Amino acid sequence: MSTVPALDIVELRKRYDNGVEALKGVSLRVEPGDFFALLGPNGAGKSTLIGIVSSLVNASSGSVRVFGTDLFAERSAAMRMLGLVPQEINFNLFEKPFDILVNYAGFYGVPRAEAMQRAEEELKRAQLWDKARVMSRTLSGGMKRRLMIARAMMTRPRLLILDEPTAGVDIEIRRGMWRTLREANAAGTTVILTTHYLEEAESLCRHLAIIDHGLIIEHGPMKALLAKLDVEGFLLDIDGSLPATLPTIEGVTFVAEDAHTLDLEMPRAMDLNRVFAALDAAGIRVRSMRTKTNRLEELFVRLTAPAPDAMEAAA
């Protein structure tokens, strides 16, 4: 028996009045319970796609279904299942966080007593309960981002879409937000994330799609797409200091990050023992090794980089 997808987009197109075709027939399927990344360079069509799904932009043609409900024919029913965390801070800065959450839930028909209980739960989850009664304009940028996630969760959405939710926040706050999103996903909420922090997508998401020039150019499991890379990278922590001359192995690149750290790139098919033997022969003792976290970035650059002939034509 087939499962109804959380989001089912078929041949979605958007042409603006100025003639720009932002989406050129996008088809995309996100399964229930997934943690899904939507990636793409600036101007690729991500914002237009999210705008259509969240009913902020009208489509030119195509279809969108949220858990089987037609977004265009039954907009209210579809939107009740969807939560959105936009890029921009879009709540009243002169309201208190508790009131922002309660009033938002009221717009969706949540009884006030239940909304107040949910507001306490979500503010505590977002580690903002101690800020519940202060003016929102006094919150830090990271707190405002967390408040937007808490607000979106007030309606208990089955599908949560986050558009660059961690932009501009420091790594400690970002990790706290990751924890919140993992908890929501583990509780059954389907999550779609757009981000320019590619290590974030690799860490959180199980599937991804890459959009470029209004078209989906890759779509599938994260592990399967990363497996397309024919090289892999490691960071080696060296016992002692690196020598002035590093060993030479065909197909392998060594770069000294500092006196005690070696950046290694090698073909995926190569036997790592061969590399370690060469390092040992050169008197380089490896204390520990960790996989580099930029594999998705490398794949992204390869897929979205302009073709050489296009670059020549532009020149």
Image: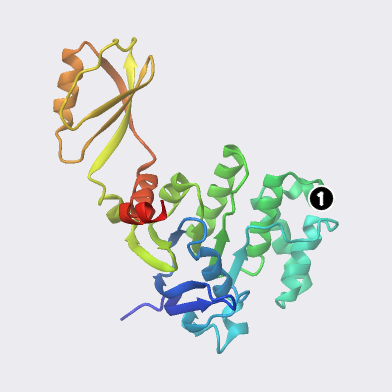
Name the residue located 79 percent from the left edge and 52 percent from the top edge.
132
Front-most of 27 and 250? 250
Residue under pointer 1: 137
Q: Residue furthest bottom?
A: 73
173 up-or-down from 94: above or below:
above
Residue 28 visible: yes
- Few, some or many residues within 10 Å of mark 1 (<14, 14–19, 20+): some
Q: How is the image coloured?
A: rainbow
User: Residue 123 location in percent, x, y?
Assistant: 70, 54
Residue 6 visible: no
Residue 270 appears left or right of 55: left
Residue 201 appears left or right of 54: left
Residue 60 appears left or right of 34: right
Front-most of 297 and 91? 297
User: Residue 230 location in percent, x, y?
Assistant: 22, 45
**Where on the picture, by quarter, is residue 225?**
bottom left
69 up-or-down from 266: above or below:
below
What is the number of callouts on the image?
1
141 up-or-down from 188: above or below:
above
The residue under label 1 is which amino acid type? Arg
Describe the element under mark 1 as helix, strand or loop: helix
Q: Quadrant of the N terminus?
A: bottom left
**Where on the picture, by quarter, is residue 148?**
bottom right
Name the residue located 51 percent from the left edge and 77 percent from the top edge.
14
Name the residue located 58 percent from the left edge and 71 percent from the top edge.
51
58 up-or-down from 243: above or below:
below
User: Residue 112 location in percent, x, y?
Assistant: 78, 71
Front-most of 216 and 85? 216
Name the residue located 39 percent from the left edge and 41 percent from the top edge.
294
User: Residue 17 location in percent, x, y?
Assistant: 59, 78
